[in-house]
Image (spheres, rainbow, N blue to C red):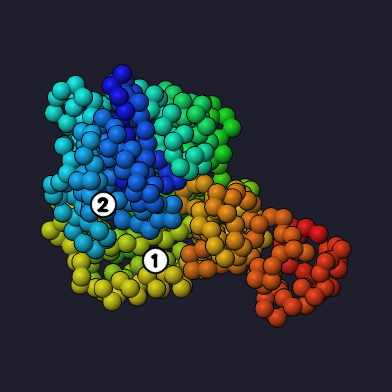
Amino acid sequence: MSGTAVILDGYVDEPACLGVPPYLSPYIRTVAGALLSHGYTVRYLTIDQLRKDPLRTAELNAAELLIMIAGVTVPGKYLGGTPATLTEIQQVGHMVRGPKKLVGGPIGFGYSGEGGEKAIRQVISGFDALLTGEPAVALDNYLHGNEPSGTLDYGRTDPWSVTGSSIIVQHPDYPFVMCELETARGCSHGISGGCSFCTEPFYGMPKYRDIPAVRDEVAALYSHGARHFRVGRQPDILAYGAGPGEYPAPEPEKIERLFSAIRTAAPQLKTLHIDNTNPATIARHEDAAREALRAIIRHHTPGDVAAFGMETADPAVVAANNLKALPDEVFRAIEVVNEEGGKRRDNVPELLPGLNFVCGLAGETEETYAHNEQFLDRVLKAGLSVRRVNIRQVMPFEGTRAYTDNTLGRHERRFRQFKEYVRNRIDLPMLQRVFPVGSVLRDVRVEVSGELSFGRQPGSYPILVGIPLCLPERTVTDAVVVDWGMRSVTALPVPVRINTLPASAIRWLPGIGKKKVAAVIAKRPFADLAAYRKVAGNSPVDNLLKF
């Protein structure tokens, strides 16, 4: 045996990979597999666990080898964890003295504390080596006495993804771990240079994993208790296995085989969602895209989101940054996904689009924001649904055109106005459309406990659920929507136990409000629904009340 190795998860977030809890990135699992192949006993620790208990540094010092995976190239806001900062990464490097220390992941591309600032590529002090390229391959090369670098080779990493699957049981969220599945790396749009700001072209032209390899990984994860999966590690799920070219046509039969294989490997899975979907693929190959979407919907679980990298509704900015789709193409893609995925199952739509806007790109003007607002207003007035609208400022990386050609800092006031417009004028009516009062959200897991507890369903871009009760963390409950916030819903556990519910929660019931709370409290306990209705009237959640 080679002793103990510790993987410290600093979390990753890239255009085509998410590894912030409850998500677990493929990097962690393949690195674990590589370590196991060298005879190490592998321990797993997150940066949040280390923050909460700095004395756990002793576990790192006691190991023979420390591998830290970190790096954010797409800034976001997170509930389940906070990615490691550059300062924290370097603190780990300097505080840990015992083992050999290696660091890898997208941190090698550079670091910025937030969107709207350039990501600077710099030496990460305190570590013995930076694992450049594919972390697991670079690690394997290093352990064989070679340079700590390596390019992606599925022939090497696929077996590690199977043997490394056992690492999930050490995750603090286990068994509620969302396993990010990789099906491809690299971007076909890179043939023309890629989008000006995106780091995915750094990985080259697309490489696709074989379906048996994905199936075997899912089967291994499932055998260790995984029940939640997202096919999220690829730039465009509809292009899986597709031919050459910048905008290859979907091959629906391959997508059917892929998702069928996942379902066969994990027959009792609870979540199977997707992530990135190129709207240009849908607009340019509508019939094939529809067939591919239908294949996904046949096998996935409802509440799914197809994330569209729209970036802007300004055609001039599209052209200046070599973006993938013009506004009319995105609009058509939204229509198609609504038509194919808008049907509701288990109280939620099967599959809806999500929109990503990136601000601060080259060519942007004050008018750009008017284009964006007009586009979203058009979507709303057309009766279409989008699951969420994500707005961020570009984080330019060295090696992308946006690093030297951007408009950061020029339209700050208009950027803030646009965000406020979306939050006030778009988000609320969309939430009301997607999650009407009375919708029951299954398996909401409490992640933040308090007088107002917050939880989410497992899934791709799950809605934030505020529950006006103090519920312990990790509580899992069905919850009925009773109101909406800016980017969240307010919900009550199902069944709604009206005779014991505190006044602070009763006031959220439809038709009650602050005025009727006292009357409801005074008349409790209610013998049945008829007695309750005499005081409170009828509401969409009456069938969920428990007496």
Of the pair 348 and 104, the residue shown nearer to us? 104
From the viewer's perspective, is 18 left or right of 546? left
Q: Determine whether 454 is above or below 164 in the image.
A: below
- Where disc 1 sits, the SS reads helix
Give the residue number, with chain letter if any, for mark 1: 375
Numbered disc in front, either 2 or 1:
2
- Give the residue drawn at x 23%, y 52%: 86
Q: What is the crowding at mark 1: few (fewer than 14 residues within 10 Å), some, or many (at least 20)?
A: some
Give the residue number, with chain letter if any, for mark 2: 88
Residue type of the residue flagged with mark 2: Glu
Q: Quadrant of residue 137?
A: top left
Residue type of the residue flagged with mark 1: Phe
From the viewer's perspective, is 363 left or right of 156? left
The C terminus lies in quadrant: bottom right
Of the pair 439 and 196, the residue shown nearer to us? 439
Of the pair 526 and 266, the residue shown nearer to us? 526
The N terminus lies in quadrant: top left
Q: Looking at this view, name the residue that lies furthest to the top.
A: 1
